[in-house]
Amino acid sequence: MITNVEIRSLEDWMKDPPKGTEWVDGKLIAKHPNVWVDDVLVEHQMTLRHSRIQANLAGDWKNYKEQQNLGGEIYTEAPCRTQKQGRKPDVAYLTPSLSAQFRDVDILPQSFPLIAEIVSPTDFAENVIAKAQEYLQSGGEEVWLIFPQNQWIIVVTHSLRKVFVSGEIADTQVVLPGFSITVDQLLA
């Protein structure tokens, strides 16, 4: 949805976030912006691989929560508010209690408990790590940073950081207890 309202604040963004945007550091930004690399403009586009990983993980989390009768909801690109930003995580899980509490809101007023961000080749590591910390400081409990090019999954919670690589099994640490998937299966 494209809005005709000028976005000047996080509160404006929260009312009607334009498609494909986040509110970061007091500015409206494209979720997947173009960047300059060695004096060459690299246009970011959602790749088939990124989209496939996003859909597969959302489906895997959904199937697992249903098989385990855990309740809650799985979302893709759903807007949430962190302490000072407006974000749209690639994949997110909302627990049953939070789902009931925020059933009728358009934008979650905190981070989702479980979030996955699929890292693009044009993303900067510092920005991705800062985003994970931001989620954890705003109600998030567990963040998966998925690096398709390197075949890494980094799982971050308030108390630990784990790196899973090709040939290993990545598993949830706090939210959706017992969920696991091989790195190769998710990133295939």
Image (cartoon, helix red, strand yellow):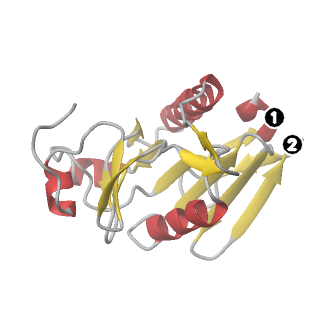
User: What quarter of the picture does the N terminus occupy?
Assistant: top left
Q: Looking at the picture, how far across and down is residue 160, in whole percent?
A: 68, 72
Q: Is residue 128 above or below residue 3?
A: below
Q: Is residue 11 left or right of residue 156?
A: left
Q: Looking at the picture, how far across and down is residue 180, in whole percent?
A: 70, 43
Residue 78 image-quadrant placement = top left
Q: Estimate how packed mark 2 is, as few (under 14), some (14 to 19) or many (20 or more) residues with alpha carbons within 10 Å.
A: some
Q: Is residue 105 left or right of residue 64?
A: left
Residue at left 56%, top 48%? 35
Q: Is residue 2 left or right of residue 121?
A: left
Q: Which mark is residue 41?
A: none
Q: Is residue 178 visible?
A: no
Q: Is residue 8 left or right of residue 135?
A: left
- Looking at the picture, which amino acid does disc 1 mark? Asp
- Looking at the picture, which amino acid does disc 2 mark? Ser
Front one among 37 and 114: 37
Q: Is residue 18 visible?
A: yes
User: What quarter of the picture does the C terminus occupy?
Assistant: top right
Residue lying farthest to the bottom in this orientation: 159
Q: Which mark is residue 166?
A: 2
Residue lying farthest to the right in this orientation: 167
Dot 2: element? loop
Residue at left 59%, top 52%? 177
Residues at marks 2 and 1 touching, judged by CB atoms closer than 8 Å: yes
Dot 1: element? helix
Q: Is residue 15 above or below residue 136?
A: above
Residue at left 29%, top 48%? 99
Residue at left 31%, top 62%? 110
Residue tagged 1: 184
Mark positioned earlier in the residue sequence (2 or 1)? 2
Q: Looking at the picture, how far across and down is residue 101, in whole percent?
A: 21, 54
